[in-house]
Image: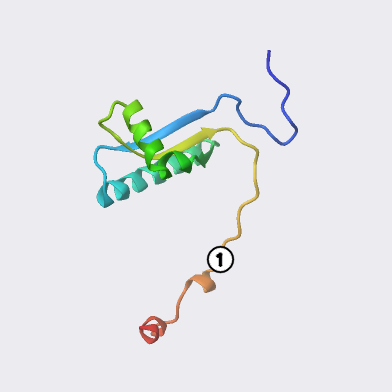
Amino acid sequence: MTAERTPGKDYESDPLVVVLCSFHDGAFAELQAGQALQRVLATATTLGLSASFLSEVIGVRPVREELRRALGGTLEPQAVLRVGFGSPVPAGPRPTLEELLTPIGATRARR
C-alpha cells in the first residue's frame, strides 16, 4: 500500500542515498571528489533526477568519522547526496553575459 502524497511533494519515500568517497583525504582528494561530483550531478540531471546535499553528515567531524567506519574504514567520505525524482522547480536567476565579463584592464586597476 502506497501512502498518499501531499500535493506538490512528489518525491520517493525511500530515496537513493549516495556517498561519494575518495581513497585519500586532503586538498587534491577534495578536488578529485568535486570533479566526480560534477559528473554525478550532470548525469542525474540528464536522467531527469534531482539531487540534494546532506551536508551535515560530512560537515560534522564525529559523524563523518562514523560514516567512514561504516564504509569499512578505508574510504574518505567527501559528499552525501539524496538522489531521486522530485518536483520541478523554476531555474534560478542567472547573470547576463555582460555581468560576467570584465573590461580589459579593469582587473589590473583593482590590484
Q: How many marks?
A: 1
Q: Quadrant of residue 85?
A: top right
Give the residue type that dot 1 points to. Answer: Pro
Q: Quadrant of residue 15?
A: top right
Residue at coordinates 49% horizontally, 39% vertically from top-left?
54
Q: Give the x, y percent position of residue 106.
A: 42, 83
The N terminus sits in image quarter: top right
Q: Residues within 10 Å of mark 1 (few under 14, many from 20)?
A: few
Q: Answer above or below: position of 33 versus 13.
A: below
* Closest to the observer, 103 or 71: 71
The C terminus sits in image quarter: bottom left
Q: Quadrant of residue 23?
A: top left
Q: Residue extending furthest top?
A: 1
Residue 61 located left or right of residue 29: right
Q: Answer above or below: position of 61 versus 16.
A: below
Q: Residue extending furthest front?
A: 62
* Closest to the observer, 89 or 64: 64
* Closest to the observer, 85 or 29: 29
Residue at coordinates 52% horizontally, 41% vertically from top-left?
52
Residue at coordinates 33% horizontally, 37% vertically from top-left?
21
Coloring applied to the structure:
rainbow
Q: Give the x, y percent position of residue 24.
A: 24, 41
Q: Give the x, y percent position of residue 95.
A: 56, 66
Residue at coordinates 50% horizontally, 28% vertically from top-left?
16
Instruction: Give SS at disc 1.
Output: loop
Q: Which residue is mark 1?
A: 95
Q: Give the x, y percent position of residue 79.
A: 40, 41
Residue 86 located left or right of residue 104: right
